[in-house]
Amino acid sequence: MNWNGPIRRTHRTLVPIFTATLVITVVVLAVQGPEWVSYLPLPPLAFLFLSGVYLFVRPLVAARRGGAAADSARPADAGSPGRPAAYRVRQLHRWSAVAFTLTVLVTIVALSLPEPIIWVSYLPLIPLALLFFSGLYQFALPYLGARRRSAEVTARRTPA
């Protein structure tokens, strides 16, 4: 079975869930609510991480095996004028996820030292910002494409 589609949909669904739980957590903690609320974003974050790892690794494994998903790792028309921006944003998103994971691990190690290095805790914010904006772009891309296609169909139907 090809799990790529269901996992991609799950990944896209988890993003707003994670964002909502993160906002709720920040608001509740800002008004001095219970500390257990800080654990709310962890389950969607874990599933986001696992689905993201799958979506990152699958094309690499398929390319190594020469399978059909190797074509989805790099689209045939990646060099054409219509697709390179979306392709580059997807690659930026994937590698930002890797950088974010590594910076979080570095932060955990730096903060667990006897004399913690506090400034290191800000390092994950850079790839996190890239993840956020590239993810927003990818999330909006299908809707923008549908709007553009419907405008083209309307333009073809109206007489000049």
Image (cartoon, grey):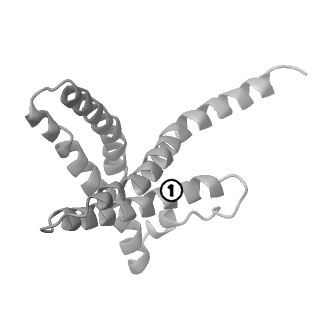
Question: Label 1, on which residue?
Answer: 90
Q: Is residue 141 left or right of residue 131?
A: right
Residue furthest out toward the front: 115
Disc 1 marks which amino acid? Arg
Q: Is residue 6 left or right of residue 149?
A: left
Position of residue 62 measured from the top left corner of the image (x, y, whole percent):
39, 72
Density class for disc 1 (Cα within 10 Å; few <14, some 14-19, many ≥20) is: some
Q: Nearer the viewer, residue 116 or 138?
A: 116
Residue name at image x 25 percent, y 27 percent: 27
Residue name at image x 40 percent, y 72 percent: 60
Residue name at image x 29 percent, y 56 percent: 121
Above/below status of 155 relative to 135: above
Q: Nearer the viewer, residue 114 or 149?
A: 114
Position of residue 74 measured from the top left corner of the image (x, y, whole percent):
54, 66
Visible in this render: residue 2? Answer: no
**Number of on-image labels:** 1
Visible in this render: residue 76? Answer: yes
**Picture quadrant where residue 159 is located:** top right
Q: Nearer the viewer, residue 159 or 117?
A: 117
Q: Secondary structure at mark 1?
A: helix
Position of residue 72 measured from the top left corner of the image (x, y, whole percent):
49, 62
**Picture quadrant where residue 2 is located:** bottom left
